[in-house]
Every structure is written in C-alpha cells, then in structure tokens.
Image (cartoon, rainbow, N blue to C red):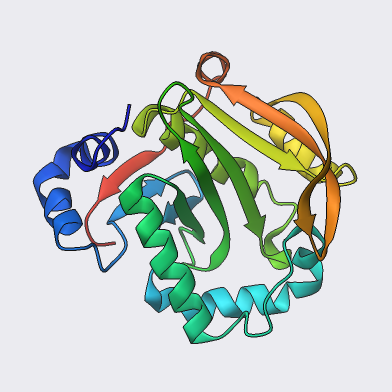
Amino acid sequence: MIGSRRDWADAVLPDAKDRLIGLLRAGMVTAPQLRLDTQRLYLRPPRMKDWKAWAGIRQTSRAFLTPWEPTWPTDAFSRRTFMRRLRRQIADWRADRGYALLIFDRSTEDLMGGVNLTAVRRGVAQVASLGYWVGEAFANRGIMTEAVKAVLTFGFRQIGLHRIEAACLPHNEPSQRLLTRVGFSEEGFARNYLRINGQWQDHVLFGLVREDFDRFDQPHPVISTGDD
C-alpha cells in the first residue's frame, strides 16, 4: 500500500529510493525517471521536451480523438497549456493521485499515444481509473494492447493497486474489445456518466482486480530508472 511519500518511493523505484526521496523533498520539478520497456514500445512520464511531438500528434489526430475525449480548450496545443498539464501530472505523481505515461516506439522514438492511471484511491479501495489514447497514424496495430498491459503490470505489481477501472462509450467497440482482451470484465452501465466532446454521455463500465490479472499470462515490462 502506498500511504506516504516514502512508501511511494519504495514501491515505484525500489532500487533508487534515496534519490527519489531527495527529488520529492526538493519539490520534484521534473518528471520521475521511470521507464517501462515492452517488446516494441517504451513508456515514461511526460517531460517538457515532449511538447512539440505531443502537440503535433494530437493536432493531426484531432478529428480521430475528439469524439472520445472531454472538450479541448482553444489553446490545446500551446506550450503554456502543455506546461500546466505537465505540472499537474508531476503533482499527481508526487501525491500518489495519478500516473501519466507517454508511449514511444522503441526503434524510431516516435511518440504514439498515452496511458494514464488517474483518481487513485487508497485505504480500503486501492483502486485507480485507466485512460488511454493513440494517434490516428498508429491505430489498429496492437500498440495500445501492449501499452495497457505494461501499465496494468505497473499498477498492480509496482504501486500496489488491487483494482483498476475503465469506462468507455457504448459505441466505442474497439475500446471495449481492448479492455476485454487484456482481462477486464464488463460490470455495468452508467447514464450520463462523463461529459465527453461537450455532452454528458452514457458509459459502459469495466473492472479488473489483481487476482484476475495474475491469472492471465501477462508479459512483464522491464522497469528501469535513470536517463534514457
């Protein structure tokens, strides 16, 4: 269980505890040096240097992504907006509220998308919500399946979650197939659950608990620290 900053450091980066605690005490002005490596991809926390690539892929994929996301601000691609987003994500890492990761191609270094664990609740719950997005040019290649499996392993085995939840629009069949493929079970239906693309919309609810995840033959990502 992650109950304090020291617990967080022990769980996320057990081999670099002293260095991480120093970053936390200093205010962690940069993202933690964490990397998950899979067969084709690597995932790491966003950094300021990612702004141009992030804005570029989001801008070219706008029509592809906006039906599934909250309404984008008018300055969605600006450096200032990205900086605000990054500061919030770093604060969430520090406070054990959420874990944002970007997805990169290991061979080309191209930014491809992102996966987030948000709304972390500890105590008797030990639960978080899963979200993800992929650039249109990289869709339908199995990339998100590979990335989500890595983040599930991180969530359950590195930061001690017991349950991970996800929700998707009823007509988002690719997302529902993805969740089922990585082990989630459909658990319910919520009316007007989230405000997506400017409208309150119904969602199908999915859940996965640690015991069910462990029954799957999941590949373990290589988790490393330090500079890339």
Q: Is residue 39 visible?
A: yes
Name the quadrant of the N terminus: top left
Q: Is residue 190 left or right of residue 108?
A: right
Q: Residue at x 40, y 46 (%)?
A: 37
* Numbered marks: total: 0
Q: Nearer the viewer, residue 222 or 96?
A: 96
Q: In the image, is residue 155 above or below residue 55?
A: above
Q: Is residue 46 visible?
A: no
Q: Position of residue 184 (x, y in %)?
A: 67, 26
Q: In the image, is residue 26 above or below residue 156?
A: below
Q: In the image, is residue 25 above or below residue 78?
A: above
Q: Is residue 93 left or right of residue 164?
A: left
- The quarter of the picture where residue 146 lies is top right
Q: Nearer the viewer, residue 86 or 222?
A: 86
- The quarter of the picture where residue 196 lies is bottom right
Q: Position of residue 127 (x, y in %)?
A: 51, 30
Q: Is residue 9 left or right of residue 170?
A: left
Q: Is residue 177 left or right of residue 30?
A: right
Name the quadrant of the C terminus: bottom left
Q: Position of residue 58 (x, y in %)?
A: 65, 73
Q: Residue at x 48, y 84 (%)?
A: 80
Q: Residue at x 63, y 74 (%)?
A: 57
Q: Residue at x 43, y 77 (%)?
A: 83
